[in-house]
Amino acid sequence: MMQGKQSIAFEKAPYIIASASIVGTKEGEGPLGKLFDMVGEEDHFGADNWEDAESGLQKDAVYLALKKANRKPEEIRYLFAGDLLGQSIATSFGIMNYQIPVFGLYGACSTCGEALSLGAVTVASGNATRVLCVTSSHFASAEKEFRFPLEYGNQRPLSASWTVTGSGAFIISSEAEKNARAKITGITTGKIIDYGLKDSMNMGACMAPAAADTIYQNLVDFGRKPEDYDRIITGDLGHVGQLALYDLLLEKNIDIGKQHMDCGIEMFDQESQDTHAGGSGCGCAATVLSAYILKQIEEGTWKRILFVPTGALLSKTSFNEGQTVPGIAHGVVIGGV
Amino acid sequence: MMQGKQSIAFEKAPYIIASASIVGTKEGEGPLGKLFDMVGEEDHFGADNWEDAESGLQKDAVYLALKKANRKPEEIRYLFAGDLLGQSIATSFGIMNYQIPVFGLYGACSTCGEALSLGAVTVASGNATRVLCVTSSHFASAEKEFRFPLEYGNQRPLSASWTVTGSGAFIISSEAEKNARAKITGITTGKIIDYGLKDSMNMGACMAPAAADTIYQNLVDFGRKPEDYDRIITGDLGHVGQLALYDLLLEKNIDIGKQHMDCGIEMFDQESQDTHAGGSGCGCAATVLSAYILKQIEEGTWKRILFVPTGALLSKTSFNEGQTVPGIAHGVVIGGV
């Protein structure tokens, strides 16, 4: 059901019946380390190159999610998937062997929110019984794709974030089945917002305006206040982006200081892990949602949250050509079963 | 309504109420040249670089489609968009200013089929009144992204295709409105199919297995024979891929020789334009659909067609790492109003 300007409220809310998370060693050593389903012993995960390692992450996350739901690939009607690499190769080579019809997505680090949104629309409308959403990122493949060769050992400013090595997979079903973890009750789809920032080493600031816009529109479309959510959770704004988000929403007299949480901030210990502004990447919001957020909802600690993965829209080509770094953020309302 | 293994038949088929196409000079000189809405005077389209030129194509295609439908951007609920460049920058910078909530897609040259599929699902299910689907490609930005600098002047084998400079935009509505051009009655979503081919200069052969798989599944899911379609139209298999497609379907006793058409073959005159296997790219299927195919449907020449844009899933990184080039193809059933 269309809701306000850019949201949908599902009349028959689809369920997240199972999910899985797999991360790298550094993420395993972080504050949430014990909650992930699988932590790699080393970040190659047995592969020959970083891209192949990332493909392996998606393959394993999908495998684990299917296992938890006790479902076979042929019981999944569609796959909604994406990653950060050019032409989404981590996805193509990661999920190919499952032979599930696939919709490839690109929303930078917001892709997890985009995948859950389109997956929920497809299931809620009766066009699929069960779909799977998966996204990934890998620190080393992302550095290679967007920044410098690791061997170069470049210095990172304090505003830079650390791309999370990890993948999260979610099975959405029209029925609660055995052990549904949560319900997706609505979505708010983001617009591309460009404040003219060009600093790819400060992506938190680049994405904050998009996060503010989507959160604001979600509150307007659903007629809610921040306190109607137990948490408003952005993907990877980090410490710098969080401050920008607060300021932008305060300009509209909205204070989310009490409700806000950021997956990137939660992922690492800023002091001891030397990750500067926080974690980022398609795998950041996805693994934290699977391992930590859904757990709080399952246990009843949180009744309703707004999950808002955030993406910075740039490529090395657009950066080298002097383009700005616009942002996008996709909101997903998740509640208890 | 779910149909067979991987298809959807829409109970209330959404309408394509307007569409637009814009192409480059070479496409304008081809056999379909007079049918496109706009032909550029030169392929920079006034921009400073090729990526920006491609962004301009999307911007203009969306503008023209909105104008034809007599609609403003705020009357479009969602945009489904993509291109071939890393991190889909042609899309991000092309459609940003319309400020329409956007779902970014990546399905290589199949993206037009993917966009129409998800757009149709969203509209048919009542989750949007009106959406816009747009895809693009540009010969020069694609050569830079996937192959060699143009200045290098590399020789192209006869199996190579020529990336189309162009963009096609489509407005899908739940109502016929004033002058609906066609109806989307169903979709068949493709799986990633990998026959182990590695030749990025023969993408027709790489994509043919995926096209065969999607066409076969469409016929099975809807209980149809090739002759139930006036045309079965692939995106950009070209002359080499077309032969592979025929062979693969004949192995299953399906002969589509009488119905088959390929947008890549139609786009250029193989002899005089030196384009070898044919046209390709996200803009190829999209512009031919808008300018030529929908025209035949509008005029009643064709009652029902199966439109199957085809994509080759590779990046320069996956190619350099010795990976295969898997294919994907998304089927869209289009009929008269």
Image (spheres, coloured by chain):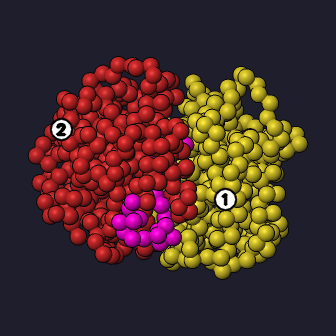
Chain colours: A red, B yellow
Q: Quadrant of residue A166?
A: top left
Horizontal and vertical percent position of residue B332: 61, 65
Q: Tag on residue B210?
A: 1
Residue A213 appearing in the image: no
Circle 2: element type = helix
Horizontal and vertical percent position of residue B306: 68, 67
Report the front residue among B317 and A3: B317
Q: Tag on residue B157?
A: none
In-image side of A14 versus B157 (left or right): left
Rendered-image quadrant of the C terminus of chain B: bottom right
The residue stretch that appears in magenta? A64-88
Report the front residue among A273 and B117: A273
Q: Is residue B159 above or below residue A202?
A: below
In-image side of B152 versus A154 (left or right): right
Chain ID, mark 2: A
**Figure label count:** 2
Q: Is residue A227 above or below residue A71?
A: above
Horizontal and vertical percent position of residue A179: 28, 72
In-image side of A242 versus A61 (left or right): left
Q: Are marks 2 and 1 in contact (CB under 8 Å)?
A: no
